Structure formats: C-alpha cells, structure tokens
Amino acid sequence: MRWGHCLPRASWGSSLGKGLQLPGECFPFLTHWSWLLRGDRPLGPSRAFIRHHGSSVSSAPPSVRQGQLFRSISAAEAIQRHRRNLIEWFSRLPREERQFGPTFALDTVHVDPVICESTPDVLLRPPAELALEHQPPPAGLPPLALSQLFDPDACGRRVQTVVLYGTVGTGKSTLVRKMVLDWCHGRLPAFELLIPFSCEDLSSLGPTPASLHQLVAQRYTPLKEVLPLMAAAGPRLLFVFHGLEHLNLSFRLADAGLCSNPEELQAPAAVIVNLLRKYMLPEASILVTTRPSAVGRIPSKYVGRYGEICGFSDTNLQKLYFQLRLNQPDCGYGAGGAGISASPAQRDNLVQMLSRNLEGHHQITAACFLPSYCWLVCATLHFLHAPTPPGQTLTSIYTSFLRLNFSGETLDSTDPSKLTLMAYAARTMGKLAYEGVSSRKTYFSEEDVRGCLEAGIKMEEEFQLLHIFRRDALRFFLAPCVEPGHQGTFVFTVPAMQEYLAALYIVLGLRKTMLQQVGKEVAELVGRVGEDVSLVLGIMAKLLPLRALPLLFNLLKVVPRVFGRVVGKSREAVAQAMVLEMFREEDYYNDDVLDQMGASILGVEGPRRHPDEPPEDEVFELFPMFMGGLLSAHNRAMLAQLGCPIKNLDALENAQAIKKKLGTLGRQVLPPSELLDHLFFHYEFQNQRFSAEVLSSLRQLNLAGVRMTPLKCTVVAAVLGSGKHALDEVNLASCQLDPAGLHTLMPVFLRARKLGLQLNSLGPEACRVLRDLLLHDQCQITTLRLSNNPLTAEGVALLVEGLAGNTSLTHLSLLHTGLGDEGLELLAAQLARNRQLQELNVAYNGAGNRAALALAKAAREHPSLELLHLYFNELSSKGRQVLRDLGGTAEGGARVVASLTEGTAVSEYWSVILSEVQRNLNSWDRGRVRRHLELLLRDLEDSRSATLNPWRKAQVLRVEGEVKALLEQLGGPGS
C-alpha cells in the first residue's frame, strides 16, 4: 500500500518545525499523510485498533517516560513536538474512513493481524507455482505482538533489526501506522525516539547525496536539536523503513562504501545500507517492512528477526474487526438531507448475519484472511445499508480499494519498464476474469490460471515480473476454493472482483483479436511511412504516365480507416455483449444486483442448496455495471493513478457504442428487478446527459415488489430525478418504503402522473412528505394510490392540507388505511376545499353509519367528485340502505358504492369490489373479510328474492357464485 506521491524536497524542511497546521495546508512529512490530512485521497484499509494479544505495558504520559538521554528541556520539548506532529498526521481520516462514523479513530480501534516469526530457511525455500494457501507457521514459534518484535531471540541474543514482510493486503501500512501511534501515546516505552521513513519517498530522491542528519531534519524539523544525541541513544532509537521494495539496495562496497558518520553526504540508499550494516549508529534499532519478493535485498546476516504478517488467519479476529467497524454510528449522510441513518438494531443484525456466514466456513472466510478484504466487505455493507455519501458508487469503492492497496506502485523497482503492479494485474487477472465471464464460470483450475499468467511470455525479464507478481499479489486476487465439490480449484477472492477485473480488461482495450493485433501493426507501419511514400508517388505521378500510382496512393490512405472500422466493430460487439448480459431473460426473475451482492456477503437465510443438486447458472449482472462505472470521469482519474489510463476518446467511443445498443434493447418492458439493474447501470456511469438520452423513452417506472433500501432510493432519484419528460406511472407497491425514502424520491414523484404507494406500511409521518408533494408547484399527479397503509386519521389530517392546495389530483385511494370514523368525518368536513377530485376510495376503514353518511353527503355536494367507495366499512343493513337511497334522491352528484347491489340489481362496480378482495386476500384480516363477504352475500340473496326479472336473477346468481368462491378460499361456508 502506497504512502503517497512525493513532494519537492524544498517543502520538507520549511513546514515540519511549525505547530499543528490546518487540514488544507500541505504537510512536508511522508506525503501519504499529507494527502490524508487534506482528505482528498483515500487511505488504505484501516484496521480498528484493539489489542487482542501481547500489548506493551502502561500508558503513562510520554513526558514522564523520557530517558536520561533527552532530559534537557529543549530536547524533551523537541521530542514532545515530534510526538504531537506524528499524532496529528497519522490520525487524520480520509473520506472513505469517515463513512464508518464520526467517532471512528484509528488509534482506538484496531485488530492486530497475526505476525508469525519466520526463518531464512523458509524464505529461501522455492515457492510452489500457485502457492495460494496460507502456510502454517513453523512449530514452536508463537505469534508476535508489536511490543515483542525486539525481544531477545531463542538464543538470548539482542535483536536490533527486524524485517516484516507480507503480500499485498495483509496490513503492512496499517501496522506501521499503529506502531507509530502506540509510540506517540507512550505504549512503546522501550524506545525514546521513533523516526519513520517511507522508502518510496526516499527513492524519489534518486542518487542526490544527503546525510542521515539531513534526511531526518528535512522531514522532522523539531528533531534538529536532538540530532547530536542520536549516536548515544543506542537501542532506544528506532528507525522504521516502510516499503523496502521501492529501494534498490546494494551492499557491495563499490556501490555503497562504508560510512559511520551521520553527517557525511551519501545517496539515500547508501545511508540505509550503512544503517543496516550496523556501521552507522550500530546500536540503533531498525524495523523494515516489505513485500516478499524484496526480502532478499537485505542479506540475512544483517537481520535479527523475520516476521511474516499473516493477516486474519483466525476467524475470531475477522468477527472482531467487523463488530468494531460496523457498530460505529453513521455520519448522517442522507440523500437530499433526509437524515436517514442505520439504527443500532440494524447494525447488530448485519454483524450477526455476517458472523453466521463466517461460521459456516463460507468462501468469505477465505477472502477475509486478508485484512484489506475485511475493509472492502465493511465498505460494501455501508454502501448497501448505510447513508450513501454524494457521488459514491460501487465501482468507485472497488477502484478506491485497489488504489489503496496498489496506488501507483511498480511491480519491480529494478525493471526499466516501470510497469505498475495494477497494470500487470489488469492484463493477467483481467484476462482470467473475462474468460470466466464469457464462459460463465467462477471456478478455475491451475491450468486456467497458469495459462493466463504465462500467455505471451518469452523473455527472461517477463518471467522475473511473473515471479514477483506470484509472490506479492497473486494471493490478493485468487483464493483456494473451500466450497464442497470444488476443492483444488481457485476463485476470485470476492465474486464481484472477477466482474470488476473483467470490465477493466475490456475498457482498457486489452482484449484484442488476432485481426486487431495484426491490423494495428500494419496501420502503424503504414502511418509511419505513408506520408513519405505518398509524397514520392505524387511527384512520380506528375512526371510519369503511370495510372496505377494514384490507386496505390489512395490505398495507403484507406488502410488506417479500415483498421479504425475494425476497432469500431469490436467496440460495438463488446457493447452488444454487455447489453445482452444486462437484459438476459434467464435473470428476469432473480433479485436485483444490490440484493445479490448483499446476499453474497451476508449469506442466504434458510437451507442451502444440496451439493448433489444441479448447479445454477452463474450470474454476472455486475459486469455491465462495472463497465459503465469504469467509464465515468472520476474512476478514470483514479485508474490513471494506478497506471491504467483510459483515453478520453476511447471512453467516448465506448460510451457511444453502449448508448446505441441500449437505445435498441432498452425500450423493452422489463421486470421490476431488471429495471432497477438498468437504473443502477446509469447510476454507476454518472453521466446525466447519457442517461437522459437513453431513458427518454421510459414512460412507466414499475418497481413493485423491489425492496427499496435508502441506496436504491438514491439510485432512482439520481438517475430519474433530473429528467424532463413526464412519467405516465410510477408503481412502488410493496417496496418497504419509509418517509426518508419518500423524501429521497420526491424529484421522481414530481414527474409522475400516476403514483402507486400501496402496501408500504406508511404511517402518519409519511403523510407530511405526501402533503409537501401535493402542495409543490410542479406536482402533476392525477392518481394517488395509498391503499393498505396505516395512515390513520392523523395522517389524513395532513393529507387534506395537501388536497386543499392541489390542482392536479383527480383519483385518490385510501382503501384500508385505518381512518375510522374520525378520518372519514375529517374528510367530510374538508372535502369542499378541493375542487378537482373525481374519485375517492375510503373502503375497508372501519367507519360506522354516521361518518359514512356524512362523507356521502359531502361527496354529493362536491362539484367534481363522481365516485365514492364505502364498501367493507362497519355499516349496518339500514346504513347501506340509506346510502343506496341517497344515491337516488337527486340527479347528478357522486355515485356511492357501499354494496354489491343497487336496489334489486347488481351494482356495476361489483367486479371492482371483488377484485380488490381477491388482490388483498393474503394481507387483510381474513375473519373480518369473511364477515363482510357474508353480509354482501345476504344482500345479494335479498335482491334476488325481491326481483322477478330473470335476467337480474341470473346476474345476481353469477355474483353470488363469485362471493361463495372467495368464502371457500377464506375457509368460510360455501353456501
């Protein structure tokens, strides 16, 4: 994990001696913490700091612990200023860490990764070709705590130099950060002075001569006063060199001569070599961190102890990490200022589900062996379940995650090509990932992996790069499969990483056919010589009567255009494959991609599929999402820092090809979950103009049955909220919406003509949002369906305020909303304030005769109301008769529907009533519905006996049959 880009040397010495600076200022220290302080670049996956084993002792104030060397007032004050500066720089949280809550702090919550002592014999042993499994530590060597790194070895000899090594993602950077903060807070009393260095920072100096004192003073100005005392500090002085793989150390005398004077000018690498030789400051303690491939750059005779950072090899450490991370209070990000936040009960539920998944020996346990992936799991869960910071996407989380772990690190600092580690991974792991997606598989044999790693390798330098990648980063991307029936195969560490790398492989243009490769070489060759040849042919054509020369001249111009068309066809083919993957009919009735991702992390509740059952087809619905996300400007900027630049022209041409295919296939009517996936693609792309053009034909937004989490509400609002054309219908029935979700979706509601919010458990608080919606000057809703929500009379009191000021609403359904007598009387009193309403449904609300009659009279006097639904209320036979008589006492006015009959005839709305019952049979109180149906059946029998018209009798008998069929479904009498 990189510590940052290098600042000019001139800035180092000018600011470090000052007091604590403002966040916007540039700190000249290790530049990793300079951008950390500004908050404009994310930090690596941080581990919350809690001791689970061997911690250093007491934590008295550091000033009390000053040794005899720095007892002068000036030296003690310099050390204190040094401590304060380090605390300030190392404790700053970037935006990606602040999402875990305002109380989150790196020096208060941290789970130490396991550090196992190693030996030179283990390091020199040749590794297996694909040694992805974690090798157990040698017997008799217990894990080490930070405070035990410099304890005497097994032979009782003093340890002065410790080398910690670990693959990418095991937590080397966080461990160093934790050690520095421990020293600053007095938890490492064995050292009076700690001086950390970034080897990447030192490598940027090149061969420019500098003394040890200059290197220290340029970075830590307060330490200028104690430089003369460093030689006498002995083992109580600790140097920390992080990221040794960035330095090319040579211990040959011809390259790094012997030097014992800390004030003598040498190349920075030579200074470090003499420190490691113990020729300069021979008593000082030194801690070095590095990747496994660079361990051999220090001869073993100069190393007192080797330690391998083994990550979270214990499942309990993973559980502790998740518990600490996920139980932090949210920062309160809310879409549109809604203030949505995850409750403690919801956070506890996430932790419990995740713990159960870990206990089940799921593949996620193997993934979370690396602390970095624990961070990714927590960040993904926060994205799915907690308030989402503006502009954050799933693709940006994965891109940030890779930048945190790889940054712009080169694969091999000694290689002149300076190929970045991430670029190499995109070429090799991306190829494997894309082949898996195209062949719809997630399990890979050793031959599959080796084929992608070794494809096209012919030179010794290429084999050397492959060897380094295998040792340092292969375990980061691939893990041994632990699923039953797939032992001996490999999978990507988390499933979504395969789809991300496959998308990256495509957008970087790494997938090329043989025709493209040959055509590119020919086009480049013709382009280089074409101008000169064309000039010569033009002169010859004027001097000599050669008719073939103009033809040859034109052919030279055609070749580059032909190649351009081949590339364009390839982009269209990729776009076609991406869109087909997005709209696969086989995936039409599965969960949306966000729910799928949550299930892959938290597990699926209920019995698992038996291993002997036929396997389900693999789903790769995140692949097109990542393709769109990687084309966004923000992600392209981060990829450029990783050494994987995407040119603006390539991004534009890819986007045009995708838009063309989406415009063709995106007009079809999609199931709700697939429609949400389509909207999520546009959210990941983060291009409003692109989305507005592609979605201009969308007229119906049907997301019925989709569980609308805060994130999904944010996705829909971000994609559709800024559109210009109206939506004929927005159906959000049974979506588990809450008032915060309604507030987030307000921009979408303002574009809707019909809005369905049935079966969402919306209470009176939601009516405040609906009131504001109805009173908005841009509201164009004509139909509002709120049935089967516990609005109560309190909610209706807010709704009537909105009705009074609204000029668009014509149809309002308040079926089964718990209004009671109070609600209906309130509607009766306020109904006249609205002049446009045409239909009002207040059926099944438990209202009695008096309230129903009052509302019916108000409806008869309303100037525009045409239909009032009052059936399934607590009406007596006399009350139903009065309502029927009221409908026939005057011409005009609203029709009142209170029963299946009108006099001796069947009501023309009988099918409406029974269809409502059929639709809500499983959600309504079955006993109460049965009682109402029995009353309606009695009315039908009375009407049938009171008429002599055979046609009417036949109609009544038909409706009686429908009612009896419903009673049989409810378990009531059939006759």
Image (cartoon, rainbow, N blue to C red):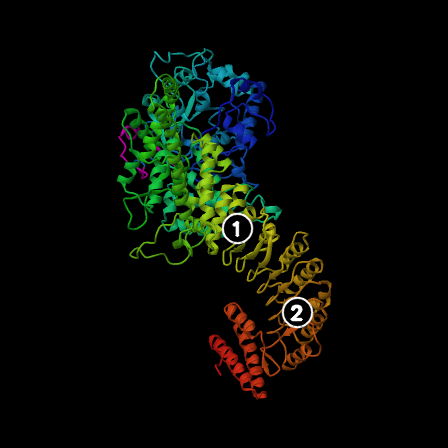
- The residue shown at (40%, 54%) is 585
> Does the segment drawn in magenta span residue 129?
yes
Disc on res. 697: 1
Is 154 or 894 nearer to us in this picture?
Answer: 894
Is 355 or 507 nearer to us in this picture?
Answer: 507
Is 796 placed left or right of 424 in the picture? right
Is 588 placed left or right of 99 in the picture? left
Where is residue 509? Give x, y as percent: 39, 35
Instruction: Answer above or below: position of 617 versus 639.
Output: below
- Amino acid under disc 2: Glu
- The secondary element bearing badge 2 is classed as loop
Instruction: Answer above or below: position of 172 versus 17.
Output: below
Is 563 or 251 nearer to us in this picture?
Answer: 563
Is 241 or 383 nearer to us in this picture?
Answer: 383
State the quadrant of the N terminus. Answer: top left
Q: CA distance from mark 1 to mark 2?
A: 33 Å
- Amino acid under disc 1: Ser
Instruction: Answer above or below: position of 85 versus 848.
Output: above
- The residue shown at (39%, 35%) is 565
Magenta range: 114-136
Determine if residue 557 is in view. yes
| Quarter location, residue 942 | bottom right
Total label count? 2
Q: Earlier in the sequence, mark 1 or mark 2?
A: 1
| Quarter location, residue 733 | bottom right
Where is residue 353? Give x, y as percent: 44, 52
Disc on res. 866: 2
- The residue shown at (56%, 72%) is 913
Determine if residue 376 is in view. no
